[in-house]
Image (tube, rainbow, N blue to C red):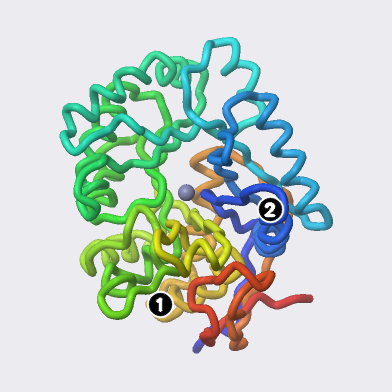
Amino acid sequence: MPTDSLTLDRPLDMHLHLREKEMLGLVGPLSAAHFAGAVVMPNLVRPVDSLADLLAYREQVAAATSGHVFMPFMTLFFRDYSDEELAAARPHLLGIKLYPAGATTNSEAGVKAIDAAESTIRRMEEQGIPLLVHGETHGFVMDRESEFLAIYRHLAETFPKLRITMEHITTAGAVALLDAFENLFATVTLQHLLITLDDVAGGLLNPHLFCKPIAKRPEDRAALLAAALGAHPKLMFGSDSAPHPRSRKECCGCAAGVFTAPIALPVLAELFEKHHGLENLQAFVSDNARAIYGVDPPAKSITLSRQPMKIPESYGGTVVPMFAGEEIGWSVRSD
Ligand SMILES: [Zn+2]
């Protein structure tokens, strides 16, 4: 017998870009309407890399999402931090996000670039601060994550007590790595459960599906989907929802990022139902993350129902979501 509705307890988005100013004002409430909390990425135009910046940004997020039950879990942008800086920031953050600019195609060289970061990473391990990683080398675009897996292995072995989250994984190899190291965890986006490179560039180019890491092969998608549907306890939902104005997407030099925050939960319900995994959606969008990070989001429940919804062509007239204009089978019940 089909389920007509599903109530999620404290759904969380464990990787979210909220931006600043007008864009934050537009997209912040959309996330806050559906999620009890989200991990807010620190890559603003001027990265969030001090406690003062983090607290100021949290204020902006709180102001933009006021009126909703919504807890922003803040992150710092990785740089060298002293013990004192880490100790002061620790109560206010979920983790520190590393974008390894020095990593190259050669994984040895990549590990060497990571070496420069190791004193801070060791301090994080000692203080129990999780490390969140954008794991791509500068190699061939389809191979960047696969090449980075050697660096994840190196980090997991060198810092066995460090909690490491492989952000927005896109490959079967990354899924396999979850089971190889106790201290490795991962987020996966909505789009990487649904699309492959064919959807982005196999026919006419679809800039609204262009993101980094780029969508991969069908077998990669299958591995990600199987892990999500099976509620793999080390895999969390993180939308990586990344809004850009239409003018930055529908242009030459299209910015990377897919905007999914306001459609993520109903699309996930439809996807999980289609694959007979609806009973595992709660773990994927909340329970796993709560267990992994020990976070305690505020009480909030979101009911999804099997009521068709047409995805808007845009939000605020400028941000185009994934599947704009299409109809999906589920929606968030507003009551
Ligand atoms: Zn991201």
Q: Is residue 133 above or below residue 221?
A: above
Between 18 and 279, the residue placed more toward the observer is 18
Query: Is residue 35 shown left or right of residue 321?
Result: right
- State the residue position of label 1: 276
Q: Is residue 279 above or below residue 71?
A: below
Between 230 and 45, the residue placed more toward the observer is 45
- State the residue position of label 2: 24
Label 1, label 2: how far apart the Cα atoms are: 36 Å
How many dots with numbers? 2
Q: Identify the residue at image location x=31%, y=25%.
A: 114
Dots 1 and 2: beta carbons under 8 Å?
A: no
Mark 2 residue element: helix
The verdict on label 2 being within 8 Å of ligand 1 is: no
Q: Quadrant of the C terminus?
A: bottom right
Q: Is residue 274 above or below residue 319?
A: below
Q: Position of residue 71 (x, y in %)?
A: 70, 47
- Discs 1/2, front: 2
Q: Identify the residue at image location x=66%, y=32%.
A: 54
What kind of residue is marked 1? His
Q: Position of residue 235 (x, y in %)?
A: 41, 51
Query: Which residue is most to the right?
Result: 67
Circle 1 Cα neighbour tier, 10 Å, few/some/many (<14 / 14–19 / ≥20): few
Query: Is residue 194 shown left or right of residue 311?
Result: left
Instruction: State the mark number for residue 107.
Output: none
Circle 2 Cα neighbour tier, 10 Å, few/some/many (<14 / 14–19 / ≥20): some
Mark 1 residue element: loop
